[in-house]
Amino acid sequence: MVLRRSSTEKNKEKKPVKVKKQSKVKKDAEIKGKNPQEKEKKSKKTKIEKLETVEESKSGRPKDEVVVYPEMDFESREIDPQDSQVLIGPPTLTRFERARIIGARSLQLSLGAPTLVDSSKKFNDTISIAVEELNLKVLPISIRRILPNGLYQDIPIDWLK
């Protein structure tokens, strides 16, 4: 349950102020030896209004501010490749796929994975080794390209140009 302040309170403070119930005010006033009516006057002078309760959604926002879309039910299905042909997306690696593969392989190499290319060449860093492995297409990696309706195709790197 979310407690909401009135517009006059929002300008004064950022934290909500809870209003005590009448019976609790009387008990507090009796304990302190003050008149309960004086206590009520003080609360009126500070312009504290009762807090409104608003129904809460899962996100913590009021329900009238939340838009809920019906869920789409679809099943993931693989497209059967025909003669090692790329059916989803371009027939080459995209720059995003290339960057992700090189970054992942570079991380593996930096953590001690064995190289898949001839190490007689002088490489300065793991990124250049990963680029060379990708260019020679020796990495045993497949790329999964997914369509919004749930269809996907797993494409080995050696199929891509």
Image (spheres, rainbow, N blue to C red):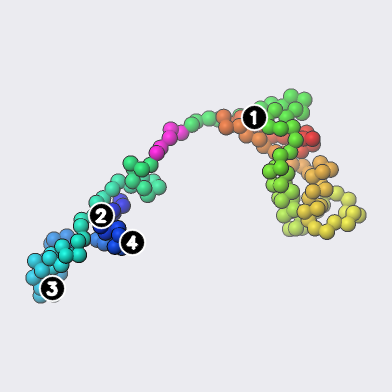
Query: Which label belongs to residue 14?
Result: 4
Q: Which residue occupies 76% across, 38% down?
A: 157
Query: Which label belongs to residue 31?
Result: 3
Classify the position of the C terminus by image quarter. Answer: top right
Query: Which label belongs to residue 78?
Result: 1
Apparent side of residue 55 relative to residue 148 in the rendered image (left or right): left
Disc 2 packing (10 Å; few <14; some 14–19; many ≥20): few
Name the N-terminal-most of marks 4 and 1: 4
Query: Which label belongs to residue 153?
Result: none
In space, the residues marked 4 and 1 are separated at their CA atoms by: 53 Å
Judged by depth in the image, the label closer to the viewer, 2 or 1, is: 2
Whether 153 is among the magenta residues is no
- Residue type at mark 3 is Ile
SS label for mark 1: strand
- Tell me the quarter of the picture where residue 86 sits: top right
Name the N-terminal-most of marks 3 and 1: 3
Query: Which label belongs to residue 6?
Result: 2
Question: Is 93 located above or below residue 107 in the figure?
Answer: above
- Residue type at mark 4 is Lys
In space, the residues marked 3 and 1 are separated at their CA atoms by: 75 Å
